[in-house]
Amino acid sequence: MTDQTIALAVITLLAAVVNGALGYGFSSITVPIALLFLSNRVLNPALVLIEVVLNAYVLWNNRDSFNAVWRRVLPVVIGLLPGIILGTAIVSQVNPAWLRFVTFTVLLPLILIQAAGYRRPIHSERSAGLAFGGALGVLYSVTTISGPPLAIMLNNQGLEKRDFRAALGVIRLAESSMTAVAYAYAGFFTATSIGLIPWIVPSILIGVPIGAYIIQRVDAETFRRVCMSFDAWVVGFGLSRLLQELAIVQGNAAYLLLAAVGAVDAWLLYRFFRR
């Protein structure tokens, strides 16, 4: 037992509550905070193995909608494979600090776009799905995060709640399973990574039912929006820290980015609750 493993248990409990409520969000909450004290090479393999089971559970709970969505999401699933192969190669080659920097840089606009409630339906769904799947495969295999872009895409296509969760389950089960195979081939499953799993699983077993209970008693869109706000602040803080660590910005000036993220998020929150 170390301070890091205790912190990871607390973080994943919070993330599991979000996942139990929304059907996604486990990695997008866990990763930005955990990367402050763990590297992608250590954290990612543990999360991928856990998410295979977690995503299978989400799909099983929404299996009645499987037939309604699988054809629509098949192009995305097909596009995942080349992206996952490329992303796994990136994780094996890139410096951990720069990998964290790229992770946060990609996540921040995705979180803010989702927080802004962006909606624009895609008309060429099949061809766009292949390209989207490739990009998603890279993002997931590098960061284990895919919830924000997936939520944007599926919400834009106007899927009902059960269909949304089923589509999410299909895509995320496919990406986590493919990534687990790619990680195994690359030799990422070390004793250090596997050793994190016993600290994460109890948090999921406790947090997911709590999230499912909460979402029945609060407005789902408000809950989602508050989670996105929390995510934005965490990613903004992590990115500011890395600007200092990598000597991109000197001194406390790096935290001007966090201040800017806070200002944008505060404006988006004000607009959301006023509406």
Image (cartoon, grey):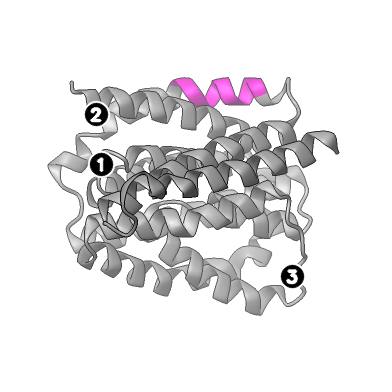
Residue 38: numbered disc: 1
Image location (x, y in percent) of residue 18: 55, 32
**Mark sitting earlier along the chain (1/3):** 1
Q: Is residue 211 magenta?
A: yes
Q: Is residue 141 magenta?
A: no
Name the quarter where the N terminus is drawn: top left
Query: In the structure shown, which secondary structural element does the residue marked by tag 3 occupy?
Result: loop
* Residue in front for this viewpoint, 237 or 167: 237
Region of the chain picked out in magenta, as a range: 206-214
Residue 167 in view (yes/no): no
**Residue 2 as seen in the image, left or right of residue 268:** left
Q: Which residue is mark 3?
A: 122
* Residue in front for this viewpoint, 265 or 256: 256
Residue type marked 1: Leu
Q: Residue furthest right?
A: 275
* Residue in front for this viewpoint, 203 or 54: 203
Residue 143 versus residue 92 in the image, above or below: above
Residue 4: numbered disc: 2
